[in-house]
Image (cartoon, rainbow, N blue to C red):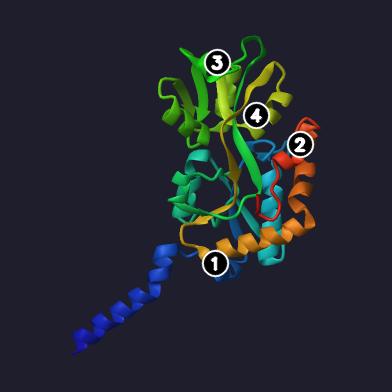
Amino acid sequence: MRKILNNFKKLAIAVTLLPALVFGASSSIENIKEKGKVRIGVFSDKAPFGYLDSNGKLQGFDVVIAKRLTKELLGDEKKVEFVLLEPANRVEYLETNKVDIVMANFTVTAERKEKVDFANPYMKVALGVVSPEGKVIKSVADLKDKKLIVTKGTTAETYFTKNYPEINLLSFDHISEAFAALKDGRGAALSNDNTLLFAWARQNKGFVTGIDSLGDLDTIAPAVKKGNNELLKSINQILVKLGKENFIHKAYNKTLKPIYGDSINIDSVVIEGGKL
């Protein structure tokens, strides 16, 4: 009888712990509030979206939005704990509960949606290709027998691997490493989000975005761990509220417009209220 009771107790404990085992200890709004912080994953080397400035302080479009999400969730933007990510570990950090939210310029794709849950979008994006002015790559055909630089875990890597397997890809773990390779002439061109390339080409003389739009028009959105519906719903509600303030436009004007100038139509990039 005692053995049966002990087994019953073990079963009851297991059932109680099941949500934590499935969703992770930091999966609920309640747990985030108990900890008094929200862990948000961002880039540290992808200016102007997420980067460390000369004083070692995080800046950028994604960072500004992440701080406002934190303020709405916890009442104080200073309660954010930023976790620095690389493109290839964004999904892993959510799956292993190292972050609560990913705000690292995360493009929504069908493959990623199988592993994480995306909130509603705040930005539009397509792929682009940047190359030296003297040897501009204007079409995919121009990449024949040449090396194309990509960053691991990006939509650019996935797109070219799937659609143009004959193109020789030179892959790097870090975004900064990929751009350094382009400057060193280790590849003929580099592919990444066009919104990033427009800014980078303006800041780096001698390079142009020869292909400014490739593949489908995609969206960028915050992501949470698969099944974390409570946090997902809260983020979407916050995005609706921010849309009424035109907050994403304000974040763009603060962080991206100084780089883009008037060369890009803000409404071709920004999404307010989480709705296209």
Using the image, tell me which numbered label, if any, was put on residue 188: 3
Q: Which residue is mark 4?
A: 197
- Which is in the foreground here, disc 2 or disc 4? 2
Whether 30 is drawn above or below 52: the answer is below
- 155 sits to left or right of 78: left
Rendering coords of residue 149 (x, y %): 52, 23
Label 1 and label 2: CA atoms lie apart by 34 Å
Q: Secondary structure at mark 1?
A: helix
Label 1 and label 3: CA atoms lie apart by 46 Å
Residue extending farthest to the top is: 134
Label 1 and label 4: CA atoms lie apart by 35 Å
The picture quadrant where one finds residue 265 is: top right
Residue type at tag 1 = Glu
Label 3 and label 2: CA atoms lie apart by 29 Å
**What residue sits 65% from the left and 29% below the top?**
197
Q: Secondary structure at mark 2?
A: loop
Whether 15 is drawn above or below 219: the answer is below
**What residue sits 48% from the left and 43% below the top?**
89
Mark 3 neighbour density, 10 Å: few (under 14) some (14–19) many (20 or more): many
Q: Which residue is mark 1?
A: 230
- 18 sits to left or right of 34: left
Using the image, tell me which numbered label, if any, was put on residue 265: 2
